Image: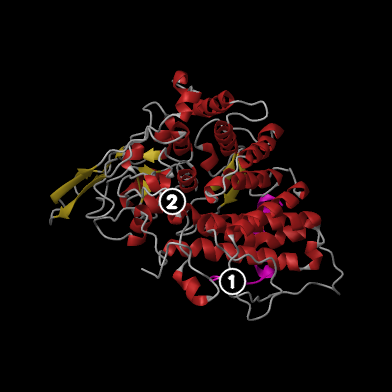
Amino acid sequence: MKYNTIFKKGAVGILFAGSILLGSCTDLSETLYSELPGDGSYEFTETEIAAQYGVIYDRLRDMYDGWEGYMDISQECGDLIMTPYRTYGGWGAQYVSLHKHEFHPTINHLYRPWYSCYQGINSCNQLLDDGTISSNERATAELRTFRALFYYVLFDLHRNIPVTTTLKLPADYMPKQETPQFTFDFIVKEVEESKPLLTKEVEKGQLNYYGACMLLAKMYLNHDAWFPDAPDNKYYGLAIEQVNEVINDGAYTLAENYREPFSVAGSKENIFELMYSNKYAGHGTNHFCKWFPAICKDVFGVSFDPWNGSACVPQFFDTYDEDDTRKADTWKWGVQRDQQGNILYDNGKEVNLTPEVWAIEKPGAGDYQGARLWLYEIQPGNIGTSDDNVPFFRLTDAYFIKAECLLRLGGYNGETEQDAADIVTMIRRRAFKNNPEKALRTVAQLKGGSVYDYGLRETQGTLDDDKNLTNVEVITTHEGGDDIILGGLLDELAWEFVYEHHRRQDLIRFKMTNGCNVFNGKSWFGKSANTNPNDHHLDIFPILQDNLDANPNLVQNPGYTTAK
């Protein structure tokens, strides 16, 4: 399955596989646009089978980085980034609701991952239903693994989801949700059985043996957070065993610089990456558009106007060590210049992106408030999206999974907590090349508290006609991070995986001394704490109201009621 197969044969795959829609997980009908050749005895080559995966890759791209996709929903509710109401208008309240943890069944972000995941699942099912394809062991293993990846995303977000493995169902079939335990076991079994049949060959965009290892490791790593009433330390050991295969086989190597995995060229570090192309697969990777004000197109030589939305949470911005090069590699702030070095002006004033932001709403953020993310390569020209290779799994993640599990277990199979500290130190070295002494991390630091100054921070008020803030109310509380277990490691995860669909999972997985997870139990900019350690309903999202209305067999997730 070569690079050009994914893009150039993608259209063929979409036509062959047909149009399969399951927006509300109720319509399992299919429309085929071609027929198998011959008398039914024809056997596809692996190249011909791969050419039919186009719709699967398309749905993965759309699920992840399409508008309001998995990337967004995994980050907007966390403590690293936000999309505040902008005082010039625009940017709907759904972003504010996500950030404030006011989840309800009509948030638009609930649509994209559900819709695209079930489209992808149905595409896998349709191909697996065909005997000429399912008779090929490798193809079957690949399709089962792709399907498991789609289910992993749905399970992570909603937990109580329908599971189907075929399209050979009655015309009036409407699926019911499975229990979380059923779905967890199903995903693990699918990947465990498929992994030995997958290739270890490394090719861009291919979900191979090592990608299956990473998917299993993620399932095991998050088990106790997903099942808080049934913790079992054995899963941390299982996660280590999976990432050890990735690390020890040497098929991937760490990038020499932090930005390489997010570039157009891709990276030797990326284990599974979603490949975007402005020509062949343009939806997604609109990071430039979502983050920067229009005038900043001159910073990057882009003629396409961005939309001035998202920003770094100021409290997180303040956590960086001043010598950590990841800060400047990730964020743009300060006075902005065009590509010739000239200062940009707006109505006679310098364009200055300030890390400080007034509030998530009431009044929200000014035009140039908030540091902006530029981690993913922004290409010049008249394009709204770049040709980035976006990592879903990368080697640094494998190392961090190992370090976390070693710390949680106090060591495993002869490896110790010090080995975990050595791993984190190794990763930090590329961010502290000019200050190598600061790369060192000790076990005590990783197991200690977080440096994040948690607590409510906003400056609310109203704007007068000149956009000056009046009736000012400063909201400041201090909770700190000393009570976070493994808080030092949680900080490391934040600096390394700022915008990689990690943060929500991490905040749910890490706990405080009072029994709450950090996701619920801490306040940060615009978001108040829920200090009930027994209330886990916000750990998952509600099911979109449209899906509930379309399928009477679906039941809303616990803790959520009717649409807001």
Return the disc, 1 or 2, that comes first in the chain's sequence: 1
Q: Residues within 10 Å of mark 1 (few under 14, many from 20)?
A: many
Q: What is the secondary structure assignment of the residue under circle 2? A: loop
Q: In this view, does 450 lie above or below 470?
A: above
The disc placed on residue 5 is none
Q: Which residue is drawn at 42% across and 29% down?
A: 324
Does the rendering let one see residue 204? no
Which residue carries the number 2 mark?
Answer: 534
- Give the residue displayed 39% in from the left and 35% down from the top: 483
Residue found farthest to the top: 437
> Is residue 12 highlighted in magenta?
yes
Q: Residue at x 30, y 44 (%)?
A: 370
* Highlighted magenta segment, given as a residue range: 1-24
Q: Where is residue 420 in the image (x, y as percent from the top left)?
A: 56, 28
- Residue 519 among those drawn in magenta: no
Foreground tag (1 vs 2) = 2
Write down the residue under mark 1.
Answer: 21
Q: Nearer the viewer, residue 206 or 170?
A: 170
Position of residue 528 measured from the top left corner of the image (x, y, whole percent): 32, 49
Amino acid tagged 2: Asn
